[in-house]
Image: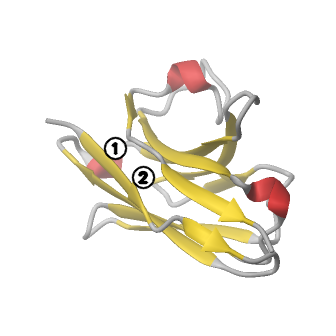
Amino acid sequence: EVQLVASGGGLVQPGGSLRLSCAASGFTFDDYAIVWFRQAPGKEREGVSRIDNRDRSTTYADSVKGRFTISSDNAKNTVYLQMNNLKPGDTAVYYCAADRPSSWYGPFDTYAMDYWGKGTQVTVSS
């Protein structure tokens, strides 16, 4: 059974930090990219960050560049998203997904993802 378990969300004040984890199982982790998405109420799901586990190459949405860092521990089949200097606009449910990389779709194309996990809530508020 494929599982992508996102954890680490919570309530944090603006300027604070959170570290999200995505624990993967049931597929060949090293052959996939892991992608973080988020969705706020009333808005479309948007891509946040991506890491290709084949070569550790990374991609970030413009809105989080310089604040978020994605990393992968292949030995643990786990991807992390370190989120610093959080803003109220970062409030959303954060999801991780797995993508067998191809050149047919963009890095944050929702329809290209092969597997999805349940999300973890991040709330940034004073």
Compared with 23, 29 (above or below) is: above
Q: Which residue reaches farthest bottom?
A: 16
Label 1, residues with CA under 10 Å away: few <14, some 14-19, many ≥20? some
Q: Secondary structure at mark 1?
A: helix
Q: Identity of the amino acid at label 1?
A: Asp
User: x, y (%) of residue 85?
Assistant: 80, 77
Front in this rendered view, residue 32 or 15: 15
Q: Residue at x 26, y 69 (%)?
A: 76
- Residues at marks 1 and 2 touching, judged by CB atoms closer than 8 Å: yes
43 horizontally vs 72: left or right: right
x and y percent of residue 55 in the render? 48, 57
Location of the N terminus (image quadrant) = top left
Q: Position of residue 42 (x, y in %)?
A: 75, 29
When the figure is inspected, residue 60 is found, relative to residue 16, above or below; the finding is above
Residue picked out by circle 2: 54
**Colouring mode (rainbow / by chain / secondary structure / one colour):** secondary structure
Vertical position of residue 120 compared to residue 124: above or below: above
Position of 114 compared to 61: left or right? left
Q: Quadrant of residue 65?
A: bottom right
Query: Which circle marks residue 90 in the picture?
Result: none
Q: Residue at x 51, y 45 (%)?
A: 95
**Furthest residue toward front:** 126
Confirm whether residue 43 shows in the render.
yes
- For badge 2, the amino acid type reads Arg
Q: Residue furthest left?
A: 1
Question: Mark 1 highlights which residue?
Answer: 31
Q: Nearer the viewer, residue 126 or 87?
A: 126
